[in-house]
Amino acid sequence: MTHTLALVANVRRGTPSPYETDWCRATRRHRLLTDLLVRARRQPAPASRIMPTVARLPRLFAAAVNALA
């Protein structure tokens, strides 16, 4: 469930309080992947390997981008 759908579902039920929990659940993968990529980019060793890895494994990169879309 997307975070938008979670909000709509909670508003329709008249129970906005569980929205934060629903939002965390709905966005967990996106937040974890984003955090992983940002942390990797900040470290010299992993950062220097990102583009060569993308070039070798374009499907992996495409899957990561699609997961964030």
Image: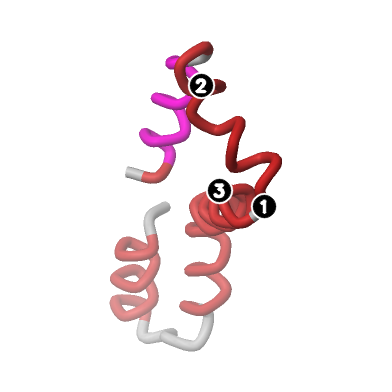
**For residue 8: magenta?**
no
Residue 66 is covered by the magenta coloring: yes
Residue depicted at 56% across the width and 22% down the height: 53
- Dot 1 falls on a residue whose secondary structure is loop
Residue 39: quarter of image: bottom right
The kind of residue on which mark 2 rests is: Leu
> Can you tell which quarter of the image residue 13 is in?
bottom left
- Compared with residue 67, is residue 11 higher up or lower down, i.e. above or below? below
Q: From the viewer's perspective, is 7 left or right of 38? A: left
- Residue drawn at x 30%, y 65% is 4
Mark 3 in CB contact with mark 1 (< 8 angstroms): no
Q: Of marks 2 and 1, which one's residue comes earlier in the chain?
A: 1
The residue to which callout 1 is attached is 43
Q: Which residues are magenta?
A: 58-67
The x, y position of residue 44, in whole percent, is 66, 48
Expressed as whole percent of the image width and height from the top left, the position of residue 38 reads 55, 55
Of badges 3 and 1, the one in the foreground is 1
Label 3 crowd bin: few (<14), some (14–19), many (20+), radius 10 Å: some
Q: Amino acid at mark 3?
A: Leu
Badge 1 amino acid:
Gln
The residue positioned 66% from the left and 40% from the top of the image is 46
C-alpha span from label 2 to label 1: 20 Å
Where is residue 3 shown, x and y percent of the image?
38, 63
